């Protein structure tokens, strides 16, 4: 069954559960960096690890072999650079290009915010948090929950607010913390609540699937198993291979065929004609937070920032503060932080974030208060 983009959006305009994949990450990257899909990414890792795997093997099995040969630290660093660090640089480059213009939020971020306006909950199969931030935060503060190994520590942040916070889930984890991508990680994940989270979040609700190929057999099996408990499913994509189109037909999934440029232009139009409106300052605040997070990464990573700042002071190397900074930097290295600064179009990342902050304040909006924990 197929329908038009206009009819599909009209059908879900009262709310929906939203699943998003790499196509959404590509939207915020713009033309500033390439966001690899799982196929090309797996080949890159296999090349780095010196692995030659049969292409008919599934991605988790192939990634398992890569992780075993590269080691966990190198594997995680590779994922972080490709899926987060480079994306952060792309976001900062876009911010620098528009920050002194009439509107300091780029159009691709606005389109993403429009898609997330009526979505609840949001399930992201990406391993980067910036797209989730830009989908959810324009409606107000939100909570991001991600899968990771039990008892594993990671850096998290939360916006201080007394308001209800919408939930955004990352069942595959985050490249900045811990991921669930390999066969062994999938097996461990089966013992957790996160394993069936994506499908359970759709209970008695409409489901919109955006930027996903649905190559993942695990997801397809769950959809088949619980199809009777989910409302209408709308799958937006630019192409539908015959095998997956037949599977969608059998499962009663409505296919919405559209080019991605048309898809995002449509959501932009809904903002233009005021069919979609954001909270006052919500879009601008979301963009500031995304740029601020991106600047932390491009400066070298948040956990290592204290040690880098101490190198410019006269703090004694054997002081308690220096010891704390060293421990934090070590944890940052394990987490795959870049550890060194990347200039963005010859500008300091922190300078770009500061300028966006100035624009936010000049527009009369408050800078959100963020608390971090590790």
Image (cartoon, rainbow, N blue to C red):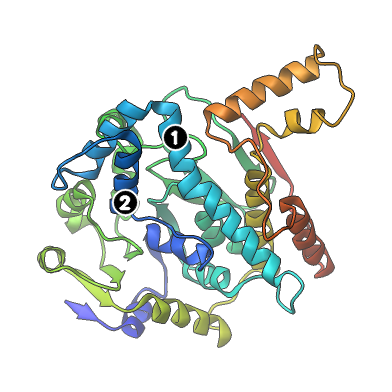
Q: Residue at x 42, y 46 (%)?
A: 170
Give the label on residue 315, or none: none
Residue that carries the numbered disc 1 in the rendered image = 76
Asked if residue 78 lies left or right of residue 51, the reply is right
**Above or below, comparing residue 294 to residue 138 in the picture:** above
Label 1: few (<14), some (14–19) or many (≥20) C-alpha neighbours in 10 Å: many
Q: Position of residue 102 (x, y in %)?
A: 74, 79
Distance (Cα) linking label 1 and label 2: 15 Å
| Disc 2 target residue | 38
Tell me if I can see residue 128 in this picture.
Answer: no
The quadrant of the image that shows the C terminus is top right
Contact? badges 1 and 2 (CB < 8 Å): no
Residue that protrudes farthest toward the right in the picture: 314
- In terms of sequence position, does the residue under pointer 1 or pointer 2 come before the other? 2
From this viewpoint, which residue is outermost toward the top?
Answer: 318
Judged left or right of residue 329, residue 313 is right
Badge 2 marks a residue whose secondary structure is helix
Q: Nearer the viewer, residue 183 or 195?
A: 183
Q: Position of residue 49 (x, y in %)?
A: 32, 34
């Amino acid at each position: 069954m197929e329908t038009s983009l206009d009819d599909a959006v009209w059908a879900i305009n009262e709310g929906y559960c939203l699943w998003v994949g790499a196509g959404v990450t590509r939207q915020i990257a713009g033309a500033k960096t390439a966001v690899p899909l799982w196929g090309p990414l797996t080949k890159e890792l296999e090349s780095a690890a010196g692995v030659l795997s049969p292409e008919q093997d599934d991605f988790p099995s192939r990634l398992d072999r890569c992780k075993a040969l590269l080691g966990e630290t190198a594997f995680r660093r590779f994922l972080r650079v490709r899926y987060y660090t480079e994306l952060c640089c792309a976001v900062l480059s876009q911010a620098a290009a528009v920050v002194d213009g009439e509107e300091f939020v780029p159009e691709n971020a606005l389109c993403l915010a429009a898609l997330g306006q009526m979505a609840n909950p949001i399930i992201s199969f990406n391993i980067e948090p910036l797209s989730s931030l830009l989908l959810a935060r324009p409606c107000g503060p939100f909570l991001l929950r991600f899968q990771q190994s039990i008892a594993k520590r990671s850096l998290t942040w939360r916006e201080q607010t007394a308001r209800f916070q919408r939930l955004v889930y990352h069942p595959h984890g985050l490249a900045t913390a811990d991921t669930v991508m390999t066969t062994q990680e999938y097996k461990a994940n089966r013992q957790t609540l996160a394993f069936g989270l994506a499908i359970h979040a759709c209970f008695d609700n409409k489901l919109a699937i955006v930027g996903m190929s649905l190559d993942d057999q695990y997801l397809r099996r769950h959809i088949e198993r619980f199809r009777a408990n989910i409302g209408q499913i709308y799958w937006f994509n630019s192409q539908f291979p015959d095998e997956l189109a037949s599977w969608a037909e059998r499962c009663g999934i409505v296919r919405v065929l559209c080019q991605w440029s048309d898809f995002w232009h449509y959501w932009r139009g809904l903002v233009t004609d005021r069919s979609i409106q954001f909270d006052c300052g919500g879009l601008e605040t979301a963009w500031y937070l995304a740029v601020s997070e991106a600047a932390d990464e491009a400066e070298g990573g948040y956990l290592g920032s204290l040690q880098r700042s101490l190198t410019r002071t006269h703090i004694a190397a054997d002081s308690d503060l220096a010891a704390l900074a060293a421990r934090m930097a070590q944890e940052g290295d394990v987490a795959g932080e870049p550890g060194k600064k990347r200039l963005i179009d010859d500008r300091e990342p922190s300078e770009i974030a500061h300028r966006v902050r100035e624009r936010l304040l000049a527009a009369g909006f408050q800078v959100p208060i963020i608390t971090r924990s590790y």
